[in-house]
Image: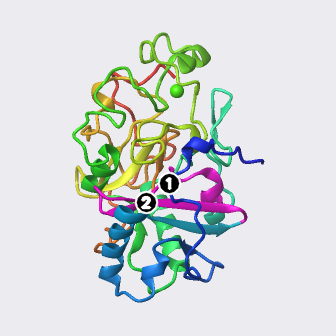
Amino acid sequence: MPRPAEPRHNAVRGWDRPPQRRPVRGRLGGVIGIGRIAACAASLTRPALFACAAAVTTGCGRAALTVDLGGGETMRFSRIEPAGIFVGVHEVTNGQYRRFRSGHDSGSYEGRTLNDDRQPVVAVSLEDARAFCRWLNSRAPTDRPGEFRLPTGPEWTALATCGGARAHPWGDDWPPTSGNYADASADAAFGWSGHAIAGYDDGAAATCAVQRSGRSSCGLYGVGGNVWEWTEQPARDGTWRVLRGWSWRYKDRDHLRVDYTDKHGAPWGKDNNVGFRVVFAPARAAMPTLDTSNPPREGSSPIRPPAATRPAI
Ligand SMILES: [Ca+2]
């Protein structure tokens, strides 16, 4: 399927500059292509690489990583200084996820596909998201200065606010100025009887292509809306995790706040408005394994919006 070109204004400064040295090569044929960071990576130890990346960002523009998944699919990561890590510029797409699991199908909603290559992957559990990260790590150079994983709660907050004190990724104003939420187009398409942000129309009834999901001031797309994002922020019994970032089905102002942490998901839960974003960051302790002591009922999903905000579907 042809991939829509990203608008020129979406380009991150320094993004497309050719590497100054030959990129680090992995078993996937160039898993990690490091642009401006490569100039200092070869001669520095692991801890120093991150310090070097920060210096590059300050002096020469935003540092970036490009991960080549093969098959024409790449993932882009941008150094977000307030979070102190590299963050996936977009939520993981169906096309990217299918490089890992070729048969994945994100399905559809009321006749609208959720499964195009450039739409964010949905119907993936926490364990699925972690497995994708492990797959990335297994194919990256063994001497990489960190790991691919899901963000922690503080990391997600920092990447969403770009280090500021804003209430929402776009700022403090209401209604939103960007992002894919429950809007007029969704209300019209699905007959949600007013389940939409008043005065807001983002043009996407369901999920939209990640490059059209709203750009934050630090160059990340879809931080607000499109799909909820799995994090490693613990919830409930310690195995559940907090979902951040809201989705195309949400509209309430309080639920679209950066500090909203009341939506939780069980490790096995899947839903059509839950996906994930990957970060490249210093390694953390091994994540807990799936708790199978309380398995879900067949066909059920423990991930649900609060009753007050869930549209009549
Ligand atoms: Ca929308």
Decide if ligand 1 comes within 8 Å of the CB at mark 1.
no
Does the residue tagged 2 have its C-beta within 8 Å of any atom of ligand 1? Answer: no
Q: Residue furthest front?
A: 59
Residue at the farthest right position:
1
Q: CA distance from mark 1 to mark 2?
A: 6 Å
Q: Is residue 23 above or below residue 279?
A: below
Residue 61: which numbered mark, if any? 2
Start-end of magenta stretch: 71-98
- Residue linked to disc 1: 13
Is residue 180 visible to us here?
Answer: yes
Q: Is residue 64 above or below residue 215?
A: below
Q: Position of residue 155 (x, y in %)?
A: 29, 56
Question: Which amino acid, mark 1?
Answer: Arg
- Circles 1, 2 touching at the beta carbon (< 8 Å): yes
* Frontmost residue, 256 versus 106: 256
- Badge number at residue 255: none
**How does the figure colour the protein chain or chains?**
rainbow
Residue at horizontal 51%, vertical 59%?
A: 14
291 with respect to 100 (left or right): left
Neighbourhood count class around disc 2 (C-alpha, 10 Å): few under 14, some 14–19, many 20 upward: some
Q: Quadrant of residue 302?
A: top left
Which of the 4 quarters of the picture holds residue 139?
bottom right
What residue is rendered at 47% in x and 24% in y? 182
Q: Residue 273: x, y in percent? A: 49, 39
The structure residue drawn at horizontal position 40% and vertical position 23%, both measured from the top left corner, is 251
Q: Position of residue 289 (x, y in %)?
A: 35, 68
Local secondary structure at mark 2: loop
When the figure is inspected, residue 221 is found, relative to residue 268, above or below; the finding is above
Q: Residues within 10 Å of mark 1 (few under 14, many from 20)?
A: some
